[in-house]
Image (cartoon, grey):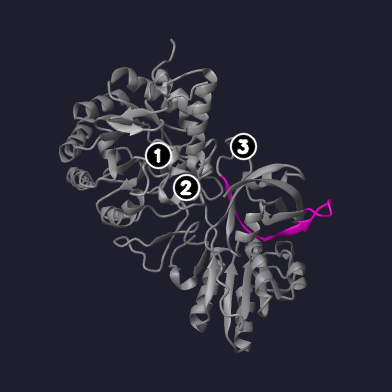
Amino acid sequence: MNTPNLSVEIAGIKLRNPVMTASGTFGYGAEFAHYMDLESIGAIVTKGLSIRPKAGNPTPRIVETPGGMLNAIGLQNVGIDAFIAEKVPFLRTISTPVIVNVYGNTLDEYGELAGRLDRIPEVAGLEVNISCPNVKQGGIVFGTDPEAAFEVVRQVRDATIKPVIVKLSPNVTDVVVMANACADAGADALSLINTLTGMAIDLAKRRPVLANITGGLSGPAIKPVALRMVWQVARAVKLPIIGIGGIMSATDALEFMLAGATAVQIGTANFLDPTAAQTIARDMERYLAEQGIDDVKELIGALRS
Amino acid sequence: MNFKATVITNVEVSPGYYRLRLTAPPFFVTAATPGQFVMVRVNASIDPLLRRPFGIFDVGVMATEYPDVQQPFLDLLYKVVGKGTSMLAGFHHGDQLEVLGPLGKGFVAGDASEDKVLVGGGVGLAPLYYLARELVKESRVHLFAGGRGKGDVLCITEFERLGVETYVSTDDGTLGDQGLVTEVLERFLESGDGAKTIYACGPFPMLRAVAEIAGRTGIPCQVSLEAYMACGVGACLGCVVKGRNHSEAAPDYRCVCKNGPVFDHTDLSWEQRL
């Protein structure tokens, strides 16, 4: 039996396999180096980065829900100066491509971040976060209005020659409208979905569980929604798509590829098992070998109707 | 590291409290230090989805039915509070679960010549047993154990068997003195001189009261925190607490899982509510 080819390409970034880690679930990579082989996965996407350090939301920030979890971390991050000084030196030591997730409060901040990251060779590409539901400014403001999304993607596009991936929110009426706006503005790829806005209530206390009141739902509970949105966008837009949403296994990941994704991101599963991304990449290879599929690319969009 | 553990025993030591003994790989027993914790996955399915954090109650090596085979083990002491711990209470000898650890930063032993003062509230006693077992080797150890009632003060005989001098108090007076553990602690500290270090684990209000006493008396103090957490490895940022210099402009959030769970009391902001 031949070893199947798992490599894929997203906007010029060569991935050894389609398994990436989702922003906000994998720190800056180093946190997981003790637990798994960082060279075993396709790419690492780092925690959402802003110009200045961000404190994030008060606690409680997370709560478990059936088949999922709500989080309202509030984009806590070290800021770009500390990222370059403290995080990039480690990322230099691995060959796996590193994609930096970025967000701003204003159009100019998105542009400034993109411009500064453009000069850092260790950064393979940018993932533009226009979909965080947990911060009042920025994020979701740009992710729910197609004209605002167009402007922010254009700003980033003009500031960097690196590949630009835009991460889409599911909290919209029509995700295809948003996808088209990003494509028109010059995005190289789309990743979807970010978390679904949700809420948990404590009956005994008659209070919301999260300090932020609402949070983003992730985990297996959202997989059917994510699959549907990936399928819709893949049919409507020519850009490569990265599927995200409740992927716990190689089976889940390959379902997203059938729906039209070129690659996938593993998020909440990293919390359950710090080796999850590596395990999923290994199991994907085993599945292809067992099924006699020579190249994983054969499965992209290969959904039968 | 992540490993599959087999349940050796899972005994209800007091109503609603269990002591769970699991097999552990040899490295675990060598690597684990007092105050560290593990993340336990009680279910291979997706409900409950996340692992549960538990302080390490004890580690060791035990005899088996085969004379020349010894079994490394890990003990946890837990209270049934929700879905995950209810499921855990149903585990029997031979059942398997997944354990990630040892995780976090544990207690610092400090100078052996000083008296060691342990303060535990309810299930907060869990990480203090392994600590006491190490500290009694070189130091005098005192334990102040508190709980709502006698059913919430756990494993006191085990501590006494180590040679620890124990002081028990309960809110309802059903065991030991009636009142707060911190009141008994304060009377003890007033009555004796000599260098001491305090090690505390329990509900946040108790820890705040202990930290206040430590601040006032100048006695060094380490506290072990509990927090909701998803990952246990510093990635989710769900378990953060405010550090002493925290402000909105200059955030000083610390991960309980990675920077803790044990902190020097001066490293934390005690203004926050947890």
Establish if A242 lies above or below B171. Answer: above
Same chain assignment for discs 2 and 1: yes
Residue B264 visible to an observer of this rendering: yes
Let me know if residue B206 is in the magenta part: no
Q: Chain of mark 2?
A: A
Dividing the picture into quadrants, the one containing residue B187 is: bottom right
Whole-percent x, y for residue A223 in the image: 47, 29
Tell me the residue at 28%/39% (across/down). Answer: A125
Let me know if residue B59 is in the magenta part: yes
Report helix, strand or loop for mark 1.
loop
Q: CA distance from mark 2 to mark 1?
A: 17 Å
Whole-percent x, y for residue A21 in the image: 41, 39
Q: CA distance from mark 3 to mark 2?
A: 21 Å
CB within 8 Å, label 2 to label 1: no
Tell me the residue at 52%/83% (across/down). Answer: B217
- Region of the chain picked out in magenta, as a range: B51-69
Report the residue marked by disc 2.
A62
Q: Residue A22's mark?
A: 1
Quadrant for the C terminus of chain A, please: top left
In the image, what residue type sits under mark 2?
Ile
Front residue of B235 and B247: B235
Report helix, strand or loop for mark 2.
strand
CB within 8 Å, label 3 to label 1: no
